[in-house]
Image (tube, rainbow, N blue to C red):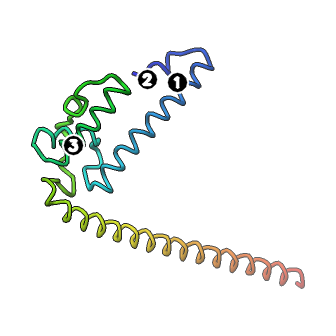
Amino acid sequence: MLYNNLQATKNPIKKMFLFLLYFCWNCALFLDLAVNFWPLLGDPQETISSRAGKGKLRGALLWVWAAKIIDYLALNLFNDTNHCVKNIHNDTGYHQLYKFSGIPSLFNWLTSAILTGFFVYWFMRGAIYVMDLMCEAFFYALSFLSRLIDTIFFLLGFL
């Protein structure tokens, strides 16, 4: 809806305002999906509202409380009642890494989140180290080619 308004608007100031609004909305959606994915070990394509709505219907204590908080914020900010249940996406949630079933599983979640965090940290460190080595090798090759070309021109100058 917002994107269609952006395309249809001819006023440049209104278009810029709608673009910034659209950009902020996309950033908020990205943060929602990112928080659901990594700290909560959920499906990367599912929002926290959808996951809280599913947990509320399932009766999981943690998600019932999370849904109450999200519904309260949605009601006061956007006048949206029963936000979590209305925003359940039935086609997502199959790829989540961890399903909360209540308070006793918080310890399991915490250990999983910490181990996943360490894995991501060391994987990224390794990837950065490999990229650093590749850049270093590229610049050594560039330096070698530069010296080779200088040597060739130097030798051609004597011939």
Q: Residue at x 83, y 84 (%)?
A: 155
The amino acid type, in three-letter code, at marker 3 is Trp
What residue sits right under mark 2 in the picture?
Answer: 2
Q: Please give left or right for residue 39 compared with residue 143 in the image.
A: left
Q: Position of residue 100 (x, y in %)?
A: 17, 53
User: Who is closer to the viewer here, 133 or 45?
Assistant: 45
What residue sits right under mark 3 in the picture?
Answer: 65
Q: Position of residue 148 (x, y in %)?
A: 73, 81
Q: Judge whether 87 appears above or below 156 on screen.
A: above
Disc 1 secondary structure class: helix
Q: Residue at x 58, y 72 (%)?
A: 135
For disc 2, the neighbor class at 10 Å (few under 14, some 14 to 19, many from 20) is few
For disc 1, the neighbor class at 10 Å (few under 14, some 14 to 19, many from 20) is some
User: Who is closer to the viewer here, 133 or 72?
Assistant: 72
Please state, as top left, top right, bottom left or bottom right, where the C terminus lies in the image: bottom right
- Tag count: 3
Q: Position of residue 31 (x, y in %)?
A: 40, 45
Q: Position of residue 122 (x, y in %)?
A: 40, 73
Q: Measure how far apart labels 3 and 1 are at the Cα level.
A: 34 Å
Q: Please give left or right for residue 53 compared with residue 10 in the image.
A: left
